[in-house]
């Protein structure tokens, strides 16, 4: 039976060859661009070690943890090394401050474009999309804590994973549609798989959802009030497992039973 590392490498190599991105073009997506590689950037993705888990912490609270090229490159590096490690059973992601992740740093991207740095602009998208692919094909369970703003690319770096914990502070949307851009960062995939016409509606309007709505639609797998997250974190920190069912039951232990409000769009667009 092939090792976990060999299986991961074979899967990625085959996919890269199929897409024609093996070689310099693919590897360039993992290089931070000069415009986003300032010294403090190494602190923008922190790592926490737990019993048999690793947690990545998006750490740009002043920018609602908006993703830069360098952050995407670090996430790619961390996640691929963790996937290959036999000592790590599962991986987590959370955000600092009042947001999980507000998506890509469009302000920084706009600056790159205005300065004519088109290669760096392309690297921004390649790096982010590369990480979303890594997450969507990850061989280990993944837990994302969606406490606060979770928009655009914030959904892309969480929803393709195994578990997503929404809270009473969660606000989800695809705001890129309001600046003339299509829902990207995996949204065109996961929105199209929602029941009824709700995915189409969200893709066209960018309307916001709360954590209860996300749970009802399946965009979140669990719901917990924000003040219980320390208990969730403490519980997960003690786990020594790579079994999704064990992680699932641990998350459910501090979960809450909630239903969408009568005015929720869930009721209008689900059928």
Image (cartoon, rainbow, N blue to C red):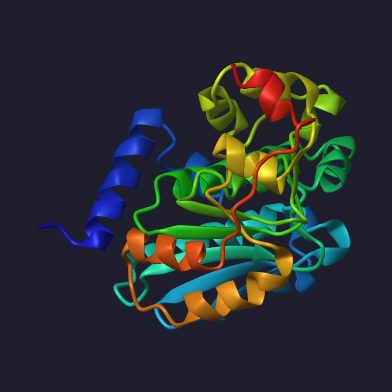
- 223 sits left or right of 43 in the view: left
Q: Position of residue 199 (x, y in %)?
A: 63, 23
Q: Residue sitting at 29 percent across and 39 percent down?
A: 14
- Taking 39 as reference, is 14 above or below it? above
Q: Position of residue 109 (x, y in %)?
A: 81, 42
Identify which residue, 187 or 25, lies in the foreground.
Answer: 187
- Taking 163 as reference, is 51 above or below it? below
Q: Residue sitting at 14 percent across and 57 percent down?
A: 2
Q: Is residue 124 visible?
A: no
Identify which residue, 228 or 72, lies in the foreground.
Answer: 228
- 119 sits left or right of 25 in the view: right
Q: Residue sitting at 33 percent across and 67 percent down?
A: 242
**Residue occupying the far left of the picture:** 1
| Residue 3 in which image quadrant | bottom left
Identify which residue, 181 or 256, lies in the foreground.
Answer: 256
Q: Is residue 247 visible?
A: yes
Classify the position of the N terminus by image quarter.
bottom left
Total numbered labels:
0
């Amino acid at each position: 039976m092939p090792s976990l590392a060999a299986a991961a490498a074979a899967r990625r190599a085959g996919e890269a060859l199929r897409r024609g991105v093996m070689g310099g073009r693919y590897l360039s997506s993992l290089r931070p661009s000069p415009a986003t590689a300032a010294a403090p950037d190494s602190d923008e993705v922190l790592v926490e070690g737990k019993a048999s888990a690793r947690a990545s912490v998006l750490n740009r609270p002043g920018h609602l943890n908006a993703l830069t090229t360098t952050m995407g490159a670090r996430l790619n590096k961390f996640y691929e090394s963790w996937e290959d490690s036999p000592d790590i059973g599962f991986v987590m992601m959370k955000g600092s401050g009042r947001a999980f992740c507000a998506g890509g740093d469009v302000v920084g991207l706009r600056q790159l474009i205005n300065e004519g740095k088109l290669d760096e602009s392309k690297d921004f998208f390649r790096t982010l999309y590369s990480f979303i692919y890594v997450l969507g094909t990850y061989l280990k369970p993944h837990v994302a804590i969606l406490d606060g703003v979770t928009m655009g690319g914030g959904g892309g770096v969480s929803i393709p994973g195994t578990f997503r914990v929404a809270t009473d502070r969660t606000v989800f949307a695809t705001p890129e549609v309001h600046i003339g851009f299509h829902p990207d960062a995996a949204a065109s995939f996961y929105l199209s798989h929602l029941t009824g016409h709700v995915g189409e509606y969200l893709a066209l309007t960018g309307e916001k959802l709360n954590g209860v709505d996300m749970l009802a639609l399946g965009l979140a797998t669990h719901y917990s009030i924000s003040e219980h997250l320390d208990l969730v974190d403490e519980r997960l920190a003690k786990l020594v497992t790579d079994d999704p069912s064990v992680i699932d039951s641990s998350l459910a232990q501090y979960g809450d039973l909630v239903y969408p409000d009568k005015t929720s769009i869930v009721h209008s667009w689900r059928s």
